[in-house]
Amino acid sequence: MTAAAVRPVAIKIDEDTRARIKRLADARHRTPHGLMREAITQYVEREEKREAFRQDTLRAWEEYRSTGLHASDEEVQTWLSNWGTDHELPAPTCHK
């Protein structure tokens, strides 16, 4: 695997946040730079997952609007209440 190009980026943070990052980095025996890189990476990964979930939700909503296919709350609740039991039910079939 080749290393990705790394380019410096400047961000402006207030002195209080800067001091908090420094204290946390010192406590973790890390550099503030390393801590901020990890924090940004984790944030971006989390937000990408949230955005993917949001897009999936919008696609599902549009599919429902165009087809009308759905499972009722009661059908889904009955199905879920049997998960992990000896009498698991198959997933409900979507209908109009």
Image (spheres, rainbow, N blue to C red):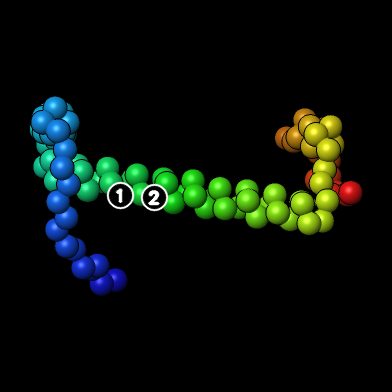
Residue depicted at 56% across the width and 48% down the height: 54
**Residue 30 percent location from the top left of the image:** 13, 40
**Residue 26 percent location from the top left of the image:** 10, 32
In the rendering, which numbered label is found on residue 57?
none
Q: Which one is in front, 38 or 16?
A: 16
Q: Which residue is mark 1?
A: 41
Q: Identify the image quadrant of residue 15.
A: top left
Outermost residue, right side: 96
Left or right: 38 with respect to 91? left
Q: Which one is in front, 92 or 12?
A: 12
Q: Is residue 92 above or below residue 3?
A: above
Q: Quadrant of the N terminus?
A: bottom left
Q: Is residue 53 above or below residue 5?
A: above
In the rendering, which numbered label is found on residue 45?
2
Residue depicted at 21% across the width and 68% down the height: 5
Q: Are marks 1 and 2 in contact (CB under 8 Å)?
A: yes
Q: Identify the image quadrant of residue 2.
A: bottom left
Residue type beneath disc 2: Glu
Left or right: 90 with respect to 48? right
Residue type beneath disc 1: Thr
Residue depicted at 63% across the width and 51% down the height: 58
